[in-house]
Image: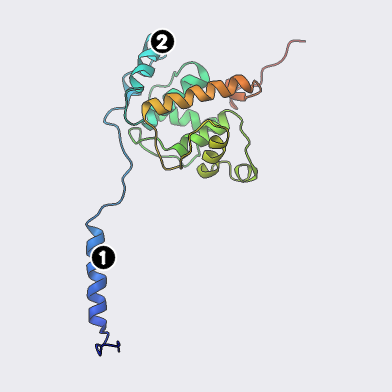
Amino acid sequence: MYKDGHRFTPAGGVFAVALIVCGLSMFPGCAAPTVAEPLAQTLGASDPETQLEFWHRLADQPVTSNDDAFHGLLLFLDGEDAHAGYDARVANLKQRGLLPGGFSEPANQAVSRGTLSVCITKALGIKGGVMNRLAPDCSRYAVRELVYLNLYPPSSPNQTFSGSEFLGIVGRMEDWQRVNPDSPAAQMPAEPPATQPG
């Protein structure tokens, strides 16, 4: 019994819970942003003019899709993207060990900073701290390491990139590679190591 003389009734509690559940069901959860048509679908060729057009138009995109990010990552790593489409890009990145085997996000979904951070740390050979070494596919630790190295702005794994932000990250990756010439980005795990003449 309450101090004012009223009693708690189970029916009143059930009614309150029902109202809360109904109220919450009216608000859908946060959905990942999507892109109507990723640029890589029309500008996925590797000739220099198409690459230039891809980078130029990506800078104006409000969101970077998985397809565009992976196309850009392959252009950065290999200087070209000879893959026929998104599925081939994903398969190649998985085969190289840059994407986790369970990755299954659609091409038009906005790339998460976490997903891309795992690819970047592996591609550049960034070992990071103890937790990053123990959990190399953990986007949280990969993002933290890239923030620490100033390759990423302060952010969380669930955030995405605009096109211009993604271009900035690629630029920072190039700068980092120049300062760290031992970075294996030019030599991926699927390729045999280059031998020194001597």
Tell me how far mark 1 sits from mark 2, CA to CA. Answer: 55 Å
Look at the image and tell me in which quarter the C terminus lies.
Answer: top right
Identify the residue at horizontal 66%, vertical 23% (top origin): 182
Where is residue 167 shown, x and y percent of the image?
A: 43, 24
Look at the image and tell me in which quarter the N terminus lies.
Answer: bottom left
Task: Name the image colouring.
Answer: rainbow
| Above or below for 6 versus 92 | below
Identify the residue at horizontal 38%, vertical 29% (top origin): 67
Q: Amino acid at mark 2?
A: Asp
Q: Does dot 1 land on a helix, a strand or a loop? A: helix
Q: Amino acid at mark 1?
A: Val
In the picture, measured across the screen, residue 26 lies left or right of residue 39, that is: left
Q: Does dot 2 land on a helix, a strand or a loop? A: loop
State the mark number for residue 21: 1
Which residue is tagged 2?
A: 47
Where is residue 12 shown, x and y percent of the image?
A: 23, 79
| Above or below for 53 versus 119 | above
The residue sitting at the front extreme is: 4
**Which corner quadrant of the image does residue 105 belong to?**
top left
